[in-house]
Amino acid sequence: MMQQNQFGQFKSSQPMAQVPPIVSTKDQLYLSDMLSWNLNACKKAHFFAQNCQTPELQQALEQAGQMHQRHYDRLLNHLNNQQNKPN
């Protein structure tokens, strides 16, 4: 379902099926930020898990860190695949 925002642009509630062939500078900066955020969250979760005394909380923190690591890896994989495609 497509919704129109206040600027008259349409946004989809579903993710893109395919990455666009051209990534704008703004998109590139946002992707760089997303990589940084996920890497930072992964490192912090791992740090806090290592310093936690409660096993259940330690496990939850490790799982959160692993989730952020997967997101980081997935973003990096998409970017590398796009870079290696012939034009």
Image: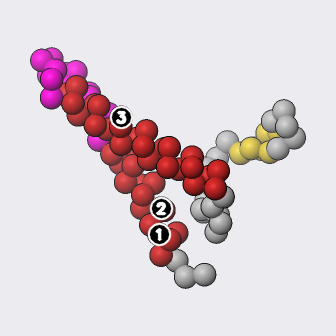
Q: Which residues fall within the magenta stretch? A: 50-67
Circles 2 and 1: CB atoms closer than 8 Å: yes
The structure residue drawn at horizontal position 33% and vertical position 45%, both measured from the top left corner, is 69
Disc 2: which residue: 78
Marks 2 and 3, the one that precedes in the sequence = 3
Q: Which element is circle 1 on?
A: helix
Spatial distance from mark 1 to mark 3, Cα to Cα?
24 Å
Residue 62 is tagged as: none
Q: Is residue 24 left or right of residue 54?
A: right
Residue shown at the point (16%, 20%) measured from the top left: 52
Q: Amino acid at mark 3?
A: Ala
Residue 27 picture location, percent across and down:
62, 52
Q: Are marks 2 and 3 in contact (CB under 8 Å)?
A: no
Q: SS class of the residue under badge 3?
A: helix
Residue 63 visible at all:
no
Q: Residues within 10 Å of mark 1 (few under 14, many from 20)?
A: few
